[in-house]
């Protein structure tokens, strides 16, 4: 597309809070992508620390590739997955020992996959779990087979139902939803409650 993207940067908490109120955003939002434009806040003292900027840029790129949108879990999970990896790479280039951090989730706290994949917005009462689980699911699918994941992404970007797109993309690996859920639940909770939660596929 030839349409230019616009990035709006808010350099004070007060400006961002006014924008949040005007846009009726959730109080936890630190940035937002909307129709090809980015709206982000930053602390001038720390420039763009963390993966916020990278997260929103992933949304921007996904929007250019799939202008009609992709499922919420995939959009947020992919943005978290890529931006965490990119920020860790940025840190390593500056001499730090850094790997992307993937949050393990207690089995009893997991959102059931049929519910997770049907959500159109992050649930306000389980925001952290939603983002962590979405990132963890993307990481699991990528580590299982990256070409298959790209095929799944493209199918979901073309609005194929997840339960149909999954076995077509991951032929023989996930013949149905229940197999994915069983294997993912084990992966999602791996190393929960320990310090061994760094991503193992970077």
Image: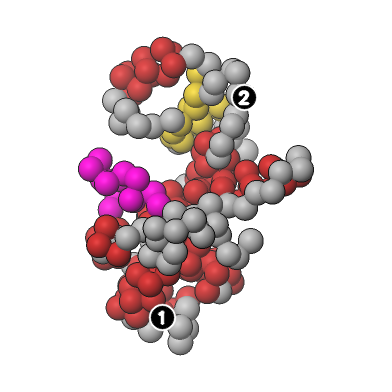
Range shown magenta: 119-132
User: SS for tag 2?
Assistant: loop
- Quadrant of the image containing the N terminus: top right
Q: Position of residue 95 (x, y in %)?
A: 76, 43
Nearer to us in this view, 17 or 37: 17
Q: Position of residue 11 (x, y in %)?
A: 53, 16
Nearer to us in this view, 54 or 24: 54
Q: Quadrant of residue 2?
A: top right
Q: Along the horizontal axis of the image, is 75 left or right of 83?
A: left
Q: Position of residue 120 (x, y in %)?
A: 29, 49
What residue is at 47 percent from the left and 78 percent from the top? 170
What residue is at 28 percent from the left and 53 percent from the top? 119
- Mark 1 sits on what residue? 174
Farthest residue, direction front: 194
- Mark 2 sits on what residue? 47
Nearer to us in this view, 201 or 6: 201
Q: Nearer the viewer, mark 1 or mark 2?
A: 2
Q: Is residue 18 above or below residue 163?
A: above
Please tell me whether residue 129 belongs to the stretch shown in magenta.
yes
Dot 1, crowdedness within 10 Å: few (<14), some or many (≥20)?
some
Residue 108 can be seen, yes or no = yes
Farthest residue, direction bottom: 172
Which of disc 2 and disc 1 is earlier in sequence? 2
What residue is at 58 percent from the left and 64 percent from the top? 200
Please tell me whether residue 30 belongs to the stretch shown in magenta.
no
Q: Is residue 54 above or below residue 117?
A: above
Nearer to us in this view, 67 or 43: 43
């Amino acid at each position: 597309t030839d349409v230019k993207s616009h990035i709006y940067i808010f350099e004070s908490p007060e400006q961002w809070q006014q924008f949040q109120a005007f846009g009726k955003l959730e109080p936890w939002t630190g940035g937002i992508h909307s129709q090809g434009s980015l709206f982000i806040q930053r602390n001038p003292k720390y420039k763009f620390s963390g993966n916020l900027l990278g997260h929103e840029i992933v949304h921007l790129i996904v929007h250019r590739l799939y202008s009609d949108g992709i499922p919420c879990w995939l959009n947020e999970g992919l943005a978290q997955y890529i931006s965490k990896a990119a920020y860790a790479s940025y840190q390593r280039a500056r001499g730090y020992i850094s790997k992307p951090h993937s949050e393990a989730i207690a089995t009893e706290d997991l959102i059931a996959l049929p519910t997770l994949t049907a959500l159109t917005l992050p649930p306000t009462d389980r925001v952290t779990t939603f983002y962590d689980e979405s990132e963890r699911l993307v990481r699991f699918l990528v580590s299982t087979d990256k070409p298959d994941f790209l095929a799944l992404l493209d199918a979901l970007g073309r609005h194929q139902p997840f339960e149909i797109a999954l076995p077509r993309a991951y032929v023989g690996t996930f013949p149905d939803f229940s197999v994915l859920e069983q294997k993912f639940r084990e992966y999602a909770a791996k190393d929960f409650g320990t310090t061994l939660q760094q991503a193992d596929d970077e």
